[in-house]
Image (cartoon, rainbow, N blue to C red):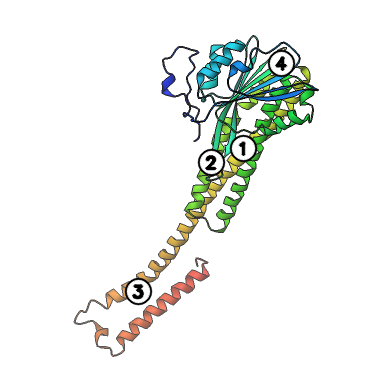
Amino acid sequence: MRKRFNEPSETIGLPPGTPIYTGEREAEKVRIRLFEYDESRFQERELDGPKECFPFPEDEIVRWLNVDGIHKPEIVQRIAERLHLHSLTVEDIVSIHQHPKVEEFESYIYVVLKMLYLNESDGEVISEQVSIILGQRFVLSFQERQGDVFDSIRNRIRFGKGRIRLKGADYLAYCLIDTIVDHYFTILERMGEDIEKLEEQLLDEPSKETLQGIWRSKREIMFIRRCIWPLREVISGFQRLESALVEESTGLFLRDANDHIIQIIDTVESFRDSLSGMLDTYLSIVSNKMNEVMKVLTIIATIFIPLTFIAGIYGMNFKFMPELEWSFGYYAALIAMAIVAVGMLFYFFRKKWL
C-alpha cells in the first residue's frame, strides 16, 4: 500500500524521541544481516538479534548492518543504545512518514530516502522509507520490509568487484544512496512506456479508459515528484557537510549522484507537462467530437425547419385554401419540400459547413 507523507495521529502529543512505528504491522520476522569486509577479507552473517554483532571492534574493517523490518521499535532501540544514537534519530527511523533529509550529529550522519517500487499488477508506485546511518567505519540501513535494490552492492562486496572494498564506510553509504537513485530511472522508464501507450490511444481512439489512464499516470508522477524533489537538497547537503566521516574523494561521487537527481527531476517534470498536455488534448478531442455531433444535429434541424413550415401551412385545412382541391397538391408539396432540402444541402456544401 502506498505511503503518504503525513504524520499519523498516534504520534500526536507524545514526548520527542518516542519510538512509535507508524506503518502497517508486519507479521514477518525482522531480518538482520551483517557484512564485514576490507580489501582482502569478507564475511556475511545473518543474526538472531543485535547483541550478536556488538560491540564493533575498533579495527579497519568496514561493517554494514542491514535491518529488514522496523515494526519492532525495541530492536531499533537496542541497536541505537549500542551505538549511542540520538533518540530523535530512533523516532525518525520507525516513523515511516519522514521526508527525505540529511542530518549531522556528533558521531554520525543520518540520511532518510524513499525507495520506490512499481506494482506489476496495477502499475502503482509504492514507496518504502530507507534510513541510512554513516558512522566511523560502519553503516546502518533500516528498511520497512525484506526486499530491496541493494543486491548489486552485496554482490560487489561478496566478489570484490569495483572499488567498494577498497573504500571506507562513506563510499558504502554513497553506493546505497546512488543505487536507490538509479532505481528511479527504472521506474521512470516504465512510466515513460505507459505514457507513450496512452499517447497512441489518445491519437487513435480516445475513451474513458484513456482518461483514467492519464489521471492515474499523472497521480503517480506527482507522487514520484514528491519523493524525488527533496533529494536534491539531501545530496547537496551531504556534499556540504564538513564531516571527518566523508572523505573528499567521496564528494566527487556524490556530485555525480546529484547530477542523476537533476536528470530525474527534469524527466519527471517532462512527464508531468506531457500528461497535462495529453489531458488538454483529450478534452479538446472530446469537445470537437461533441461539436461535430451538434453540427450535424443543427444542420438536420435547420433543413427540417422550412419543411415543417410548409407541412404546417398545408396542414391547417382552412375551407377556402386554394390548393386544397388540387389533384396533384400532395405531390407538389412533397416536391417543394425536396427542392428546399436539396437547395439547403447544396448551400451548406458550398459554404463548406458539411
Q: Nearer the viewer, mark 2 or mark 3?
A: 2
- Which numbered circle lies on residue 307? 3
Q: Earlier in the sequence, mark 1 or mark 4?
A: 4
- Which numbered circle lies on residue 30? none
Q: Are marks 2 and 1 in contact (CB under 8 Å)?
A: no
**Residue at the spot 30% in from the left edge and 86% down from the top edge:** 329
Instruction: Note whether 269 is above or below 112 in the view shown.
Output: below
Work out whether residue 226 can be spotted: no
Instruction: Note whether 317 is above or below 273 in the view shown.
Output: below
Residue 305 locus on image (x, y percent): 35, 69
Element under label 1?
A: helix
Report the amino acid beneath label 1: Val
Q: Nearer the viewer, mark 4 or mark 3?
A: 4
- Which numbered circle lies on residue 268? 1
- Furthest-bottom residue in this view: 327
Check disc 4: other Cα within 10 Å, few if <14, some if 14-19, many if 20+.
some
Q: Earlier in the sequence, mark 3 or mark 1?
A: 1
